[in-house]
Amino acid sequence: MEFFVDTADTSEIRELAATGLLDGVTTNPSHVAKTGRDMFEVIHEICELVAGPVSAEVAATDHDGIVAEGRVLAGIADNVVVKAPLTTEGLKATRTLTDEGIPVNVTLCFSAAQALLAAKAGARYVSPFIGRLDDIGHDGVQVLAEIQRIFDAQPELETEVLVASVRHTTHVTEAAKMGAPVATLPPKVLWQMFQHPLTDKGLAAFLADWEKTGQSIIRSG
Ligand code: E4P
């Protein structure tokens, strides 16, 4: 399973990239707004920090506008993936951009029917927002399971499910169990994946015992 980070904060991205465990980045207009920086500058910097796919979202809502913006965004770096909304116009533009060889991440997907259409339009990724479904009392993991089951049953579909709007580590492990190939996580959730109190407790005990031996593993000469 690949892990992307869902942010436009380049310090957070730099820190996570240094773990060697980061496969890509997703951004959206809200993330860019939070940085207060110029979008082109931010996306360019992210693409230099991470070799994997970096999603940059269009702001237009009509076919021609999405295609025009998508072409510009794709010109920022080779690893840019254009993010387009799951609307009729967004999917029309997905087909056009895909036919031009520009990869598209179809965002704001909330149902299996929508995911199927994104795949039919040739999307590189489709992003089901599971946390936002949970927020309104639906079951995001269940919708994700339905989507993944459909994609597994239709191997001719080349689109990958990119699990989005992840709120906690259980979302990630549930997605992994069902074979979702990619998840984009807020930095906080990615860092939480490293954590377990028994790891900290166990390490403290090992180090205390080691101290008593007075030994050193690195020896000079
Ligand atoms: C995905 O690409 C989106 O940027 C993101 O996952 C949205 O998540 P949110 O519901 O936490 O805003």
Image (cartoon, rainbow, N blue to C red):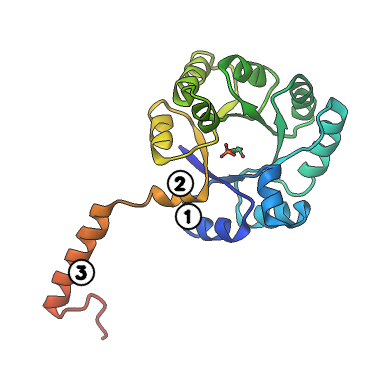
Which amino acid is tagged 3? Leu
Above or below for 118 versus 192: above
Which mark is drawn over residue 20?
A: 1
Closest to the observer, 177 or 196: 196
- SS at mark 1? loop
Q: Residue at x 62, y 55 (%)?
A: 9
- SS at mark 3? helix
Give the quarter the ligand 1 occupies: top right
Q: Which residue is mark 3?
A: 207
Residue 185 seen in the figure: yes
Residue 80 seen in the figure: no
Sooner in the amino-acid sequence: mark 1 or mark 2 = 1
User: As drawn, which residue projects farthest toward the bottom?
Assistant: 221
* Image side of residue 164 versus residue 46, left or right: left
Above or below for 33 versus 58: below
Which picture quadrant has residue 82? top right
Above or below for 45 versus 173: below
Q: Quadrant location of the C terminus?
A: bottom left
Sooner in the amino-acid sequence: mark 3 or mark 2 = 2
The mark closer to the camera, 3 or 2, is 2
Measure how far apart labels 3 and 2 are at the Cα level. 27 Å
Which picture quadrant has residue 41? bottom right
Measure how far apart labels 1 and 2 are at the Cα level. 16 Å
Q: Residue at x 27, y 53 (%)?
A: 197
